[in-house]
Image (tube, grey):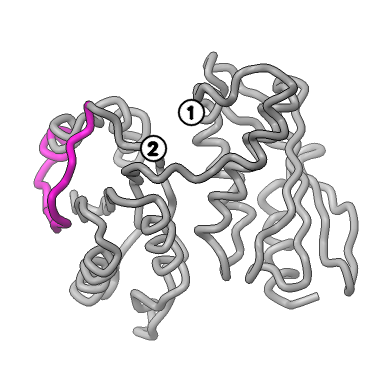
Amino acid sequence: MAEPVREELSALAAIFCGPDEWEVLSLSETDGAMFRILTKAEGFTDMDIPLQLVFHLPLNYPSCLPGIVVNSKHLTRAQCEIVKEKLLEQAETLLSEPMVHELVLWIQQNLRHILKRPEAGGGGEKCSSAASMPVDDGLWMTLLHLDHMRAKAKYVKTVEKWASDLRLTGRLMFMGKTILILLQGDRNDIKEYLILQKTCKVDVDSSGKKCKEKMMSVLFETKVQTEHKRFLAFEVKEYSSLDELQKEFETTGLKKLFSEFVLRLVK
């Protein structure tokens, strides 16, 4: 088993160290690693829903997707299948980097939004259709959070070039130490951007060496609705206060998402 995978397993064991939170199910030099994580995520009734997530990391992980199984006594079989598919979609944006912890964080932040979608209603017949749900070709939007930029000028130019090459519009937003990227465009182009963001050396580490972005998180992803502003270009903007940043989101039709996702970053 590759050393990076062993390191990821060790890190996960240290993170999920509570009672019954972590269990290694199998370790094999031919079949990879399989383990279980018990966690909780907020549902649409604001109640925490216990989730059992089983991950299988094949030998060529993280160059390929992990296997994922989702179980919960509080969700229907169809809902568990949809949660799994959304996790796999998110995993596609994290290829080539250790991703399990980030996937767990992502589902903790996004479960209630997944369950609110029409396709997440009850009904056993939805299990098979959920697994083959086509990617929507409409206009999509996603909000990313970056922890820091050491080589800011170079990093900004790289982000602008990727957005231009992929025909994405939106904002690169700075407010104090908070860094956000809001993107609009074709969903496949947004996914391509996320792959670039995670796999290319866009910044420098504390010693000045080029490094990949390891501290990016996807705060939300949604299809652009009628109330959402359509951006005509990609712009870099600096905000002097939280109120100014909030106003940007309000004029974009994202007031609710600002309060749910952005405020927690700056409080």
The total number of labels drawn is 2
Where residue 222 is drawn, which disc sits there?
2
Amino acid, disc 1 = His
Height in image: 235 above or below 4?
above
Q: Disc 1 versus disc 2: distance between alpha carbons?
A: 10 Å
Question: Which residue is identified by label 1?
Answer: 113
- Residue drawn at 61 percent across, 64 percent down: 98
Region in magenta: 227-247
Height in image: 141 above or below 56?
above
* Label 1 crowd (10 A; few <14 / some 14-19 / many >=20): some
Amino acid, disc 2 = Thr
- Nearer-the-camera pick, 7 or 166: 166
* Label 2 crowd (10 A; few <14 / some 14-19 / many >=20): few
- Residue drawn at 23 percent across, 77 percent down: 154
Q: Work out which residue is located at the far top of the displayed protein and give it.
A: 45
Among the two numbered marks 1 and 2 on one chain, the one whose residue lies closer to the N terminus: 1
Magenta segment: does it hold 12? no
Residue 200 picture location, percent across and down: 42, 76
Helix or strand or loop: what does disc 1 sit on? helix
Helix or strand or loop: what does disc 2 sit on? strand
Can you tell which quarter of the image residue 206 is in?
A: bottom left
- Residue drawn at 58 percent across, 40 percent down: 133
